[in-house]
Structures are given as C-alpha cells and as structure tokens.
Image: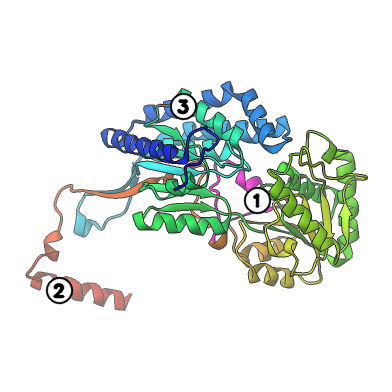
C-alpha cells in the first residue's frame, strides 16, 4: 500500500491502524454493555442535539468551504434542524420502540407462554456518508443507531474535507471513541472501512459504489443498508401544470442546486402543456430566486470534476435539443462553482442527461401523449428512489403509484418524504435496500430477537420421539383444514 497523507495529515496506513484500533475498542465496549437503558440511549441522543446546537456557525463555514458557495439557510434547515427534529422524534418515541412486541402462539400447544420480539442492539454499526449532506446523513442515522443501543463508526466523504474534519472534531469532543468515532481519509481508508466485520453497514451514494460496498461486506456476512439514489421522475398530469405546481418542482430542484438523491431528475409533461411549464418555470425563478446563480443562495457544485461532468452534459444535449436557461445572462462561475438552472426539452434517450443521474441544475422536460406511455417508460428503467405525481384526479394518482415501484413517493409535492422523521426512507432495487428514519431506522439497526417464555403447561412433547402420539393430532388437523 502506498503511504499517502490524507486530509488529517497522517498516512492512510496510520489512519487504517487507528480505524482498526477504534473498531476493536467499540467491540470491547459493546461486549461490556449490550443492553443500554432507555435513559442512557436518550442521554446519547441529547448529546448529539447539544453538539449540533453548539456548532451552528462552524457547520456553516465548513459547508461553504467544501462547496465553494452554500446558503446558510439551507445549512440550518437541513443539516441542523433536520437532525434536531429527528433526534426529538426519537426521544419522544424511543421507549415505545424498545418495548417487546407480543406475537400470537396457539394456546393448545404453548399454553399461557409469552411469545414476543425483543429489539436487541446489533453492536458496532458503520456509516459511509456521502458528500452532499455531510452532517445530516452522518448524524441523522447516528440517532437511529444510538437509539437502538449501538456503537457508531462514521466515514465521511473525502470530497468534503472541511466538513469531515469538523465532524471528527465535534464527535471527538462529545463522545468517547469507543461509542462514536469518525474516520477521516481517502479511498484506501474507505475500502478498509467497508471490509471491517461490522454488525451492520449503512452506505449512501451511487449504485456502482454500492455494489462494491456490498461485495466488500459479503465475506463478513455484514448486513447492509444501501441508499443509492437514481433518476427520480416527476409526472405532471393533464391540468396540473399550474404556477404553484411548477414552482414546487423548480423550488425542489434548486435545493442544493440539484445535488440531492431525491431531487427531481426529469419531468413528464403533457405535450400541449410544455410551453406553459417553461413559462411558469421562468416566472418562478424571476420572482422567487432572482439572479439565483449569482448569489450565495446557490450551492456550488461540489468539485471541478463534477462541474466539468455537468457542463459536458449541457454541451452534448445542447447540440441536439432545445436548452432553456431559467435566468437571463446567467453563467457558471468557476471560482464558486455556481451553475445556473437549465431545462432541456425532449432530449434524445441516448444523451447523458437521460442515461445518467444528473445530480445538478439540469432538468429534462419530456412531452407525452398518454399516461400509460409514461408508466411504461418509468418501469422500463431501473427502480427510482422516488416518484412524484401532480394531479387532482385520484384515479390518475393511483395509476402512477400502483403501477410503478419506487423507494418513496409524493403527491403534489416533491422530496418531502425524505425529510419527515416519522417516515422510513430508502430505496428498492437499483436505488437501494433497507430503511432509516424514525421507527424504521430503529428497527433497521436492531436485531429482532424472537423470545419464548414458558408459562404453565405446554405440549412440546408432541415433537419428541416416538411420534405415535402426534398422529391423531395431525390427522384431525388436516381433516379440519380440508373441511374448512
């Protein structure tokens, strides 16, 4: 292995050694405390809340440093208030989630025995965090993991070095390393992290890397939760192309300047309404976000490489389809990496904007004539992380939701399903597996141990040799089943 210094100033070799030591310490600590009380778990979640509140301005600064430009309001709403809301929801419901869940047992066999599922902490949970929401996706799942009684290891993205260093400092100040630990480094450290014999591993990012993570975890039979994104479609039905609805779509798209896994990737619009859609989109930007790409309200594209990728997409598709800039005289600023929003009208299916997840301020508008064709086209591709449908027609809404399979969905809204503390969040197929947020996150990072406690007489001797005594029971049961 090459000895390369990462952003911490130490070699990858030394960082991997520290990672392994932290993992061993967490395993040892968990073995000594496998069933932390509700009070202990709540105290840990409250520590996360205290930590976030104390670092509001450093979080602003770190995000601005990593993205070149990052609105403070977005930092507050998503990276901080989102985490605090998720933490408060867990505090309000944790004792309920921790209770045993009774299950039915036939009294003829089990008498009055107690049968239940007991949520049990898994142990040491890993979280490989993406660059687009470096605090929210590090600390939000950490709340689920701590609430379930686990210990937590976090690997931030090397695309956000300032946020990674701040996260490492914050957690190092507020938590012992045998409870929560942040590993900061590059590719070699990430590979070592995913190969640890963790008790569960969460990865958020691209499907291609998700496959690598799953393969790395497989030798240890480490269960994985994968949140992988995808090309999330929006379906505008006949009569839904209104100023309000188009504003909702565009407003969602400019969150993080499109760098969000549940952002609108492309929009299906009735052919006769395309011109109205573009007019409403221009009007929304002029009224709600004038000079958007020239202001600090516009999040910079995360890196020069990603900016070049998006610029290449625009250049390619601009040669074969109409491009509509939603701001007058707007241009990309290489220094801050602020990029203006563009619509692309009916791009060919073989262009990059139609093949790849865009993850930036480019939005294809796809005209259609029949809703059935839209549903068929969605189903012909990989399963998206989300689908959004705009309509006042309950039958049309039901058709889109019932005839497509996605990780989540919203009706007459976009992306909000990923921000509600009570609603499990995750994908399906190419967009991922597993869920976190709220009770679903608590269950995801818990072992649902089935428990039977004998009470009174039971008839388990039916299962013991010799089996003559069970013959009549079997015959009677099968006869009753046939008659029924």
Is residue 440 at least partly visible in the picture? no
Viewer-side label of 1, 3: 3
Residue 484, position as x, y percentages in the image: 33, 74
Name the chief secondary structure element in magenta: loop
Query: What element does badge 1 sit on?
Result: loop
Residue 257 appears at what percent x and percent y?
74, 44
- Dot 2 crowding, Cα within 10 Å, few <14, some 14–19, many 20+: few
Q: Residues under labels 3 and 2: Cα distance? A: 65 Å
Lower position in the chain sequence, tag 3 or tag 2:
3
Q: Mark 1 or mark 3, which has the lower sequence index?
A: 3
**Mark toward the viewer: 2 or 1:** 1
Mark 2: which secondary structure?
helix
- Tell which residue pokes out farthest to the front in this image: 2
Q: Judge depth for marks 3 and 2 and give the one in front.
A: 3
Tell me the distance, in whole angstroms, between the alpha carbons under discs 1 and 3.
31 Å
Which residue in the structure is indicated by mark 1? 262
Residues marked 2 and 1 touching at CB (< 8 Å): no
Q: Specify whether 281 is left or right of 115.
A: right
Q: Which residue lies furthest to the top in this view?
A: 54
Residue at image mark 3:
172
Residue 108 in percent (x, y) is at: 20, 59
Q: Looking at the image, which residue is at 42% across and 35% down?
A: 146
> Left or right: where does residue 452 sit relative to residue 183?
left
Q: Mark 2 points at which residue?
A: 472
Magenta residues?
Answer: 408-428
Q: Is residue 475 visible?
A: yes
Give the residue drawn at x 76%, y 44%. Answer: 254
Residue at point 91%, 59% (across, down): 275
**Relative to residue 250, is residue 372 depicted above or below?**
below
Question: Of marks 2 and 1, which one's residue comes earlier in the chain?
Answer: 1
């Amino acid at each position: 292995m090459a000895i390369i210094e990462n952003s911490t100033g130490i070699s990858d070799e030394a960082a991997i050694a520290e990672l392994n030591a932290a993992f061993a310490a967490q395993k040892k600590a968990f073995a000594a405390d496998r069933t932390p009380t509700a009070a202990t778990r709540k105290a840990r979640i409250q520590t996360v809340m205290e930590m976030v509140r104390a670092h509001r301005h450093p979080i602003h600064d770190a995000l601005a440093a990593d993205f070149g430009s990052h609105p403070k309001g977005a930092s507050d709403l998503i990276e901080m208030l989102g985490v605090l809301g998720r933490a408060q929801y867990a505090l309000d419901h944790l004792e309920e989630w921790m209770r045993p869940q009774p299950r039915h047992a036939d009294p003829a066999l089990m008498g009055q025995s107690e049968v239940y599922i007991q949520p049990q902490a898994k142990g040491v949970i890993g979280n490989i965090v993406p660059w687009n929401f470096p605090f929210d996706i590090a600390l939000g799942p950490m709340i689920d993991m701590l609430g379930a009684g686990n210990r937590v290891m976090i690997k931030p993205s090397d695309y956000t070095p300032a946020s990674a260093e701040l996260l490492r400092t914050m957690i190092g100040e507020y938590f012992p390393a045998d409870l929560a630990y942040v590993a900061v480094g590059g590719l070699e450290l990430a590979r070592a992290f995913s190969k640890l014999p963790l008790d569960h591993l969460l990865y958020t990012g691209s499907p291609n890397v998700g496959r690598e993570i799953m393969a790395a975890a497989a030798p240890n039979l480490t269960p994985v939760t994968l949140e992988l994104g995808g090309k999330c479609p929006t379906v505008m039905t006949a009569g839904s192309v209104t100023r309000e609805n188009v504003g909702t779509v565009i407003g969602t798209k400019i969150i993080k300047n499109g760098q969000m896994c549940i952002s609108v990737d492309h929009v299906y619009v009735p052919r006769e309404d395309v011109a109205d859609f573009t007019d409403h989109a221009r009007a929304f930007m002029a009224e709600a976000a004038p000079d958007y790409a020239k202001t600090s309200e516009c999040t910079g594209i995360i890196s020069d490489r990603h900016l070049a990728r998006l610029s290449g997409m625009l250049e390619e598709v601009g040669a074969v389809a109409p491009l509509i800039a939603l701001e007058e005289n707007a241009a990309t600023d290489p220094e801050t990496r602020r990029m203006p929003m563009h619509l692309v009208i009916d791009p060919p299916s073989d262009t990059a904007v139609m093949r790849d997840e865009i993850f930036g301020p480019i939005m294809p508008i796809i005209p259609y004539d029949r809703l059935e064709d839209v549903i068929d086209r969605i189903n012909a591709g990989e399963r998206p992380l989300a689908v959004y449908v705009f309509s006042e027609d309950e039958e049309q809404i039901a058709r889109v939701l019932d005839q497509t399979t996605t990780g989540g969905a919203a009706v007459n809204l976009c992306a909000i399903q990923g921000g509600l503390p009570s609603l499990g969040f995750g994908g399906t197929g190419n967009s991922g597996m597993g869920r976190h947020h709220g009770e679903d996150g608590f269950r995801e990072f818990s072992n649902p141990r089935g428990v039977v406690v004998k009470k009174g007489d039971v008839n388990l001797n039916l299962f013991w040799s010799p089996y003559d005594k069970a013959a009549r029971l079997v015959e009677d049961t099968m006869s009753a089943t046939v008659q029924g």
